[in-house]
Image (cartoon, rainbow, N blue to C red):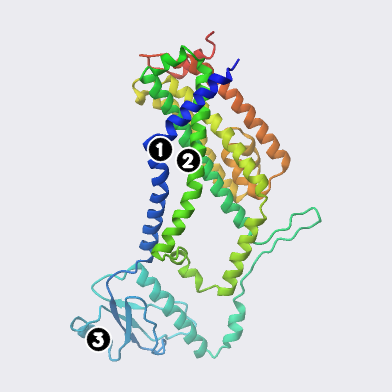
Amino acid sequence: MIQFTKLSLIIRREYLSRVTRKSFILATLLTPLAFALLFVIVCLIFQYQGDKSMKIAILDEGNMLNGAFKDDQNLYFKFETGSLEELIDQLPETDYNALVYLPTIEDLYSKRLTAYYYSDDQPSPDLEIKLRERIGQAVRDYKIDALQLERRQLEALETRIEVEPEPLTDKGEDATRFTSAVAASLGMGMGFIMYLTVFIYGVMVMRSVMEEKTNRIVEVMISSVRPFELMLGKIIGVGGVGLTQVAIWAILIPLIGGLAQLIFGIDANSPMLDTQASTFNPDDTQAMISLALTEIASINWWTVLPLFILYFLGGFFIYSALFAAVGSAMGDDTGEGQSLTIPITIPVILALYIMIAVIQSPNSNLAIWSSIFPLFSPIVMPARLAFGPPTWEIIVSLLVMLATAVFLVWLSGRIYRVGILMYGKKVKLKDIGKWLFFKD
């Protein structure tokens, strides 16, 4: 019978002894700052255009560019006349860094054109992309005029297709073309959070057990409390530490990230969207953002968040109990005991890869069965919640997961009561199997 007074004391001890440590406080406060610093550095790197300006001469033999080529940041273009041989000979004596030569198009129906770049230095990938895109657009306009094609008719051929979901019956769920994208992003985020927290804090439980066993502190504690209560209190206490840290990070990381963006004047979207922004109408972009925010607001958060917490607790208890059992079986040489953690880490890693596949097909057989299998469900099912899985799947998944958590906590307690007092012996898997049947 569990003595809840002693259990609460153990939980309080495990929780307070960790949240009051300087390492916990520093890690909790500095981690958001580290993320903000990483965010700033990455954005600055993407926005960096180089500190060396280039001046490039252009020889347009067929006048396809019509004497116009837009300068870019640190890139300056100037059209030249004369023969190619003369310009190549004179180039080292000028202030040009390179020469771009465009030969005349012999066949307007040809789909290939080679632009020659003369320089002792290779063009950077960014410069090569800019030249290819701008010359390609100019050549397209040149061919349209040369072939006397109707520009408006050609533009009418470029049709952007959008798929708008509509319910077939009144029972169907109304959705927009952003529903799947928002659900996939949310599911991926929730799945990764589950993966990281379950893995990190499960290992924290294992290390806590190992430290107390190595320091012989556990021998004193066992004299006044049962091993199972000690293990359960440790799991709950460390779980509380994990929830506290995640809650603080959930508040500080967006706050500090937003402040860093304001202070440094960083447009986080510009590095990634530069190449795409030109293809979208600004009004369309604003409408897309509005629709995406509407989709996020339409998610049933009153259902998703409580279920997420339940799966977090279930997954944490399952893996923390297993890690606690492994920690109790490890001796002074922790290197030898690392092999015992492999059977625990494999399901966690598999669940992560299954979760990525499930995001692409949330209603497949793989998604259904992996959401029910208790070692996968704490990571896979949260990734499916935004897609609205059937209620029966959620209920079955929760029942199986909670029953497995209770069973594994009991099973790990059987291993813990023997392993925590076992010293000086290299433990193998068959030894752990024998401990399950030891009598109290």
The N terminus: image quadrant:
top right
- Of labels 1 and 3, earlier in sequence is 1
Q: Is residue 151 above or below residue 24?
A: below
User: Could you say where residue 160 lies in the image, as x and y percent from the top left?
Assistant: 61, 71
Q: How many numbered discs?
A: 3
Q: Which residue is mark 1?
A: 24
Residue 245: which disc? 2
Q: Residues within 10 Å of mark 2 (few under 14, many from 20)?
A: some
Q: Is residue 216 above or below residue 192?
A: above
The reply to whether the C-beta atoms of the residues labelled 1 and 2 are less than 8 Å apart is: yes
Q: Which residue corresponds to the image point at 48% horizontal and 22% vertical from the top-left?
A: 325
- Cα separation between marks 1 and 2: 9 Å
Q: Which residue corresponds to the image point at 41% horizontal and 59% vertical from the top-left?
A: 260
Amino acid type, callout 2:
Gln
Q: Secondary structure at mark 3?
A: helix
Q: Which residue is mark 3?
A: 87
* 138 on left or right of 307: left
Q: Is residue 109 visible?
A: yes
Amino acid type, callout 1:
Phe
- Of labels 1 and 2, earlier in sequence is 1
Amino acid type, callout 3:
Leu
- Residue closer to the observer: 268 or 233: 233
* 123 on left or right of 66: left
